[in-house]
């Protein structure tokens, strides 16, 4: 019998995948890629939107939610 270890997702593989975004409450978006948590985006009123990866890596603050979503594709 052969034992295999499941592949672990990395930030690079999640970034290459198409991320599906869901609004879970006002001002909070959660992204999934390949069925796994990819990250989140939080609205900060007039201050913009912050993006954080699935490993809590801060990607930055952005003027629009679209710009924050695009930060995951880099």
Image (spheres, rainbow, N blue to C red):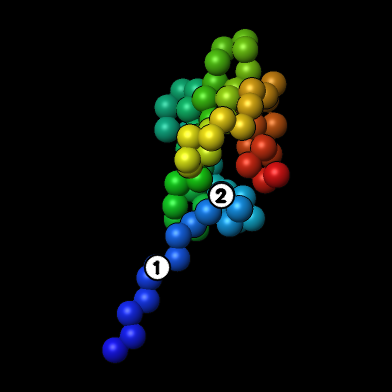
Furthest toward the left, the residue is 1
Q: Earlier in the sequence, mark 2 or mark 1?
A: 1
Mark 1, residues whose alpha carbon is within 10 Å: few (<14), some, or many (≥20)? few
Discs 2, 1 touching: Cβ within 8 Å: no
User: Relative to the observer, which residue lies in front, 61 or 4?
Assistant: 4
| Local secondary structure at mark 1 | loop
In the image, is residue 34 above or below residue 25? below
- The residue at the point 67 percent across, 24 percent down is 62
- The residue at the point 62 percent across, 10 percent down is 46
- The residue at the point 69 percent across, 21 percent down is 63
Q: Residue 59, located in which quarter of the rendered image?
A: top right
**In the image, 5: left or right of 30?**
left
Furthest toward the bottom, the residue is 1
State the image coordinates of residue 70 (x, y, percent, origin top left): 68, 39
In the image, is residue 32 above or below residue 2? above
User: Relative to the observer, which residue lies in front, 56 or 32?
Assistant: 56
In the image, is residue 46 above or below residue 5? above
Which of the numbered marks, if any, corresponds to residue 6?
1
| Local secondary structure at mark 2 | helix
Mark 2, residues whose alpha carbon is within 10 Å: few (<14), some, or many (≥20)? some
User: Relative to the observer, which residue lies in front, 12 or 18?
Assistant: 12
Q: Residue 65, located in which quarter of the rendered image?
A: top right
In the image, is residue 63 above or below residue 30? above
Q: Which residue is mark 2?
A: 11
Residue 2 at least partly seen: yes
Quadrant housing the C terminus: top right
- The residue at the point 29 percent across, 89 percent down is 1
**In the image, 67: left or right of 13?**
right
């Amino acid at each position: 019998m052969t034992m295999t270890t499941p592949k672990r997702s990395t930030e690079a593989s999640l970034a290459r995948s198409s991320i599906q975004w869901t609004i879970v409450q006002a001002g909070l978006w959660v992204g999934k890629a390949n069925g796994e948590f990819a990250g989140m985006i939080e609205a900060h009123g007039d201050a913009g939107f912050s993006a954080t990866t699935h490993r809590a890596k801060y990607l930055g603050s952005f003027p629009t939610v679209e710009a924050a979503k695009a930060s995951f594709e880099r």
